[in-house]
Image (tube, rainbow, N blue to C red):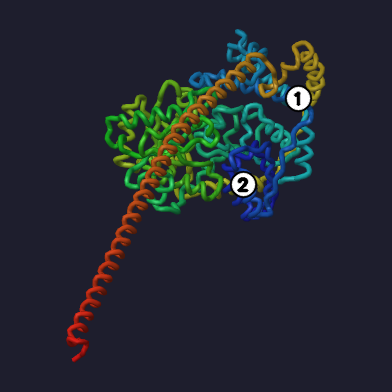
Amino acid sequence: MEARAVKIFFSMRHLGMFRMYEPTIRELVARGHHVHLALGRAEALGWGTALDKLLADSSAITWSWLSPTTSAFWSELAKTIRLWADYLRYFQPQYDVAPKLKARAEERVPPRLVRVSQHPIFQNPANRRRLLSFLRTLERALPPVPEIETQLNEERPDLVLITPLVYLGSSQFEVLRTANTLGLRTGFCVGSWDHLSSKALIRDMPQRVIVWNETQKQEAVELHGVPAERVVVTGAQCYDQWFDRRPVRTREEFCKRVGLDPDRPFILYVCSALFWGSPVEAGFVQQWVRQLRQSTQPELRSASVLIRPHPARMSEWEGIDLSPFPHVAFYGSNPVDDASKDDYFESLYYCSAIVGLNTSAFLEGAVVGRPVHTILLPEFQENQEGVLHFHYLLKVGGGVLRAGRSFDEHHAQLAASLRSPESETNPRFVREFIRPHGLDRPATPVFCDTVEELLRTPAPAPERVQLRFLVLRAVMFPVCHALRRIYGSEIFRDDWSRKERAQQERREARVQVRTQRLEAAKAVKRERDERRAGKLAAREAAVRESEAERVRAEQTKGERKRVREREKVAHARRRARMALRGRIKQKAVRWLNRVRPGGQTT
């Protein structure tokens, strides 16, 4: 049964999420639906051009900014309650191996509330659950955001989809709650492989939670308490584009484009978006290449290396000099259009192996069929084994990531991949994690089928605010205002706006480190530019001297030639004069011989 044309309100926290759902948006429009994109904010990585192209391709796609709340007090209070609840989440035993996630959540909670959370009474899990339940009750008592309610009433959608929803303190929870209050169908689209395990808790339950695979379904049920019947596994629609793609250039053309020798195999290093405060990956890549060139494995000493920087971390590469390493290229941009996607795909397709720390490029490499590698070092532990989703690379489908705990082990694994680039473990992992419905069945149509199935279900009844929540709301207003007067306005403000001293000092320290790094990079760049300018000036002087010497030689040669010509002409003239005198003398003798003595002639 074909679904009727409907209007879908798609809430995205920022434009960067567009890359996850561009194929599904195009498919939904192709099926006759209208899609309205409600964006929370823009981004600086180039996805605006992709959105412009999408809007130009179809009039069935519209967009607007997601309406912000104008009530600063209720907005700050709501965000503080959410951030506090999300912080309490990381006290659960499964996060004992992920202290960085807890520390990241703690940074965004006002210090007084952190101290409350760490009080001995809340070290008891039961008491902590009671505190979390109390915070959820407070959140339910908060008033709705009238601007979001007005926007949904104006758009009158048949379905509200939301992604990524689960960022810490996200205002998209207001969209979900308002949609439930208005009796709209709702769906939460899990945008990435780490969203359910390393972000915020789901509060109000949507009608559907759309996930990639059974691993994420288990996360939704166990970590967020979502009823299993509401979770739908569709596959990772954002990776469909890499399955049937073919290169537009030959390997030789691609290698020449990026500056590599086409006769050598190359290793692709893909950079990651590490936690802020982690060691700078650009410096590690230098060390990694140096170790590669000193390896006991001959394949690694001679292999080329292509480094693709992370588009959000380009500043890390200022001052990094890769010129001492032969056969190393630095190339790549954010794949936002067809040309940059072709570049990215060909870097995956033509490489012999992929190396990184913790990046979604491992998943794309698995799709393309290349072996993916990492090295587990203590300084990057919190970015690798210190997050839950990294372990999926090691376990799901028998594991796809080859991880070494030393450079020697890493080099042995990498050399083996260069000798045999085809990965036998990739298909099992891809089948379980990216295309659980079959390697030959794209996830995008399955996702769209799920959306249309949700559209065929009856719209839910509007959720009424219970009387106890209204009473609690009336009590919260004077109590919270009193707390603000006693403890100051900082108590209900998140880390983006509060002036808490320790937080401010951390920010200033990060700015100082960043400034020093940039100054050092500029100094190195100035020194390098001066050396290059000196070498260039020397080369230009040598060229000028050579040219002058050539001119002088040409002038000397020309002068000699002219002298020879003049001598030749003079010699010819002398010979001509001598010949003339000889002829005259001969004629005179003949004439005299004909004259008789006494003046008579014969």
Please state which of the two labelled residues, at mark 1 or mark 2, is closer to the viewer: 2
Specify whether 289 is left or right of 457: left
Residue 20 position (above or below residue 567): above
Residue corresponding to mark 2: 49
In this view, the residue in front, 263 or 320, is: 320
Res 328 quadrant in image: top left
Mark 2: secondary structure: helix
Residue corresponding to mark 1: 141
Is residue 404 in sight in this rendering?
yes
Q: Amino acid at mark 2?
A: Thr
Residue 501 position (above or below residue 296): above
In this view, the residue in front, 386 or 6, is: 386
Q: Residue furthest top?
A: 120
Q: Residue furthest front?
A: 598
Which image quarter holds the C terminus? bottom left
Mark 1: secondary structure: helix
> In the image, residue 148 lies at what x, y percent?
75, 36
